[in-house]
Image: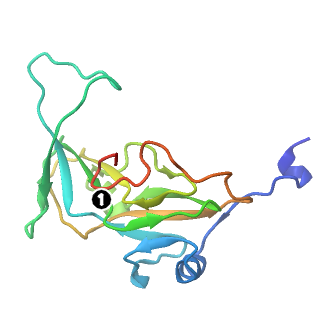
Amino acid sequence: MDRFCSGIIKPSMILSDIDIKNAQAAGVLGIEPFDENRLKQASYVLSLGAKLLIPKPLLLGQIVEPGKTEVAYDEITVGDKGYILRPGKFVLGSVMERLRIPTSMCAWLDSRTDLVRLGVCVLQGSTFIEPGQSGSHETLEITNLGPYPVRLTAGMKIVKIIFEQLQTPASHAYDGSYAGQRDGRVQV
């Protein structure tokens, strides 16, 4: 018998704007800084942080082997004029907001339509945020797949976050490689 149909496991719940605001006010989840104007009906809009990581070119003929090759990056701070992301180029960024997700919730990042329509993809990896993630500035993998150069500015609206209430809390908080990430880097 299907466990969902039998009532043993109930579906989880997406938080509404009211739920997000109440959970933030009660300290159940953390979005720092929090701006009530960024609330959508069932999501919250996050901003681009001020630092970008630009992959350094490889030596001619060098091949990257995932998990074996260390890729080097130049770190830049996006100034007042922003950073122009040319067609076909890739950078790592992060959200400005520091996130704290309780073990009773998980979250998902979702692309913003205004960027997607320009051909800018900001989420190429996993969009899932594990329960118990704390102090994290989620990493964004940003590629310009469109035909136009696009200006990225610190503080621009970059992605939405959707919170989901779990039926029961996770047995422990996330403690993997990307716990507490910021500026597109794993914290060690």
Residue 145 shown left or right of residue 35 in the figure:
left
Q: Which residue is mark 1?
A: 115
Q: Quadrant of the C terminus?
A: top left
Vertical arrangement, residue 128 with respect to residue 12, above or below: above
The image position of residue 183, as x and y in percent, is 27, 55
**Residue 149 visible in rendering:** no
The image position of residue 124, as x and y in percent, is 37, 43
Q: Which residue is nearer to you in this view: 52 or 41?
A: 52
Vertical arrangement, residue 57 with respect to residue 116, above or below: above
Please, which residue is most extreme toward the top here? 61
**Amino acid under label 1?**
Leu
Vertical arrangement, residue 61 with respect to residue 167, above or below: above
Residue 48 shown left or right of residue 175 in the figure:
left
Q: Which residue is nearer to you in this view: 48 or 28?
A: 28
Q: Tell me which corner region of the image, top left, top right, bottom left or bottom right, holds residue 47.
A: bottom left
| Residue positioned 13% across, 15% down in the render | 61
Please, which residue is most extreme toward the front here? 188
Residue 125 shown left or right of residue 119 in the figure:
right
**Residue 135 visible in rendering:** yes
Q: How is the image coloured?
A: rainbow
Q: Tell me which corner region of the image, top left, top right, bottom left or bottom right, holds residue 90.
A: top left
| Residue positioned 40% across, 83% down in the render | 37
In what element is the residue under mark 1? Answer: helix
| Residue positioned 48% across, 72% down in the render | 30
The image position of residue 1, as x and y in percent, is 92, 41
State how many labels appear.
Answer: 1
The image position of residue 181, as x and y in percent, is 36, 53
| Residue positioned 67% across, 53% down in the render | 170
Q: Badge 1, how many Cα within 10 Å: few under 14, some, many 20+? A: some
